[in-house]
Amino acid sequence: MPLPEVETHLLGGTANRGLVVRVGDTVRRPLRPSSLATHALLEHLERVGFEGAPRLLGIDSQGREVLSYLRGETVTTPYPDWSMTDEALDSVARLLRAYHEAVADFRPVGLEWAEPVPSAYVTGLISHNDPNLDNVVFRNGVAVALIDFDLAGPGSPLWDVATAVRLWAPLRPDADIHDVRRGRSFTRLRRFADAYGLTDPDRLRLVDAAADNHIWCMAYVRHGAESGHPWFHQRWTTGESELTNRTNTWFEQHADDLRRALL
């Protein structure tokens, strides 16, 4: 008789906290209204040979999606020293560029995606929309894969770069940066744009896109909290609301400085 499958809980994101498990070399995650769209995206990435995303393996007996487990490390607090280096930042930018190249000819029709992004940042490309620190897999200090495609949907390279650099630089008041990145937001902003190879037109829009992305992301968190999601509620009521306001003000006060950093 085969031994029962051992399930090991993975941290998961805020939305799926406590619901994501590892079973052997697979990951099991709850299905969502947008799962068909996400699965079509993952199948496209497999067809074009993109190695930086999990493979869809099916649906298990409990109705959970089954994905391949990608070995490596994700960045969670307390942040390890290697994850805060400029070299790690560069590798995230290069990974994001490789994903955009892989998904450029994906043209889905009639699929339901999770959370629409502002129309000004929709160009037809299916962006990841959540390249947070804990959604990037590293090996030997180099970013090799994106995970958690729950928020993927119609967007643009600019929107993904804005999301990533806002979180990885990070773009927020220095007083709210509690690691070695403090005081280096402008430098890391420029470095990420350079490593990605951002076009000149998108460089001109990047600061506004990052500010708009912060508003979009925090509205998503606030809506989750107001809808009664326990982890979103905990996040929003334990400082996120105040940090949101401080960061919005910071973007307004430093918009010109940020743009100059990209010149």
Image: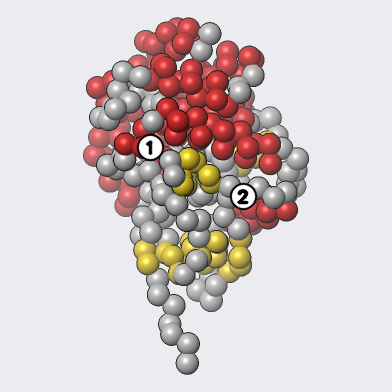
173 left or right, relative to 254:
left
- Marks 2 and 1: CB-CB under 8 Å? no
Q: Can you tell which mark lies on residue 20? A: none
Which amino acid type is shown beneath numbered disc 1?
Ser
Q: Mark 2 points at which residue?
A: 51
Which amino acid type is shown beneath numbered disc 2?
Glu
- In primary-sequence order, the first of circles 2 and 1 is 2
148 left or right, relative to 227:
right
Identify the secondary structure beneath mark 2. loop
Nearer-the-camera pick, 252 or 164: 164
Q: Which residue is drawn at 31% across and 40% down?
A: 80
Q: Quadrant of residue 141?
A: top left
Percent coordinates x, y for residue 66 in the rendering: 55, 65
How far is the residue under mark 2 from the one under mark 1? 21 Å
Q: Which residue is drawn at 53% across and 8% down?
A: 263
Other-residue count near label 1 (Cα within 10 Å), few / some / many at <14 / 14–19 / ≥20: many
Q: Mark 1 points at which residue?
A: 83
Identify the secondary structure beneath mark 1. helix
Q: Which residue is drawn at 41% across and 47% down?
A: 74
Q: Is residue 93 above or below residue 16?
A: above
Q: Residue at x 63, y 37 (%)?
A: 98
Q: Is residue 33 above or below residue 52?
A: below
Percent coordinates x, y for residue 248 in the rendering: 37, 21
Q: Is residue 47 above or below residue 19?
A: above
Asked if residue 112 shows in the view, the reply is no
Nearer-the-camera pick, 4 or 120: 4
Other-residue count near label 2 (Cα within 10 Å), few / some / many at <14 / 14–19 / ≥20: some
Asked if residue 108 shows in the view, the reply is yes
38 left or right, relative to 175:
right
Percent coordinates x, y for residue 24 in the rendering: 46, 70
Q: Quadrant of residue 237?
A: top left
Q: Quadrant of residue 161?
A: top right
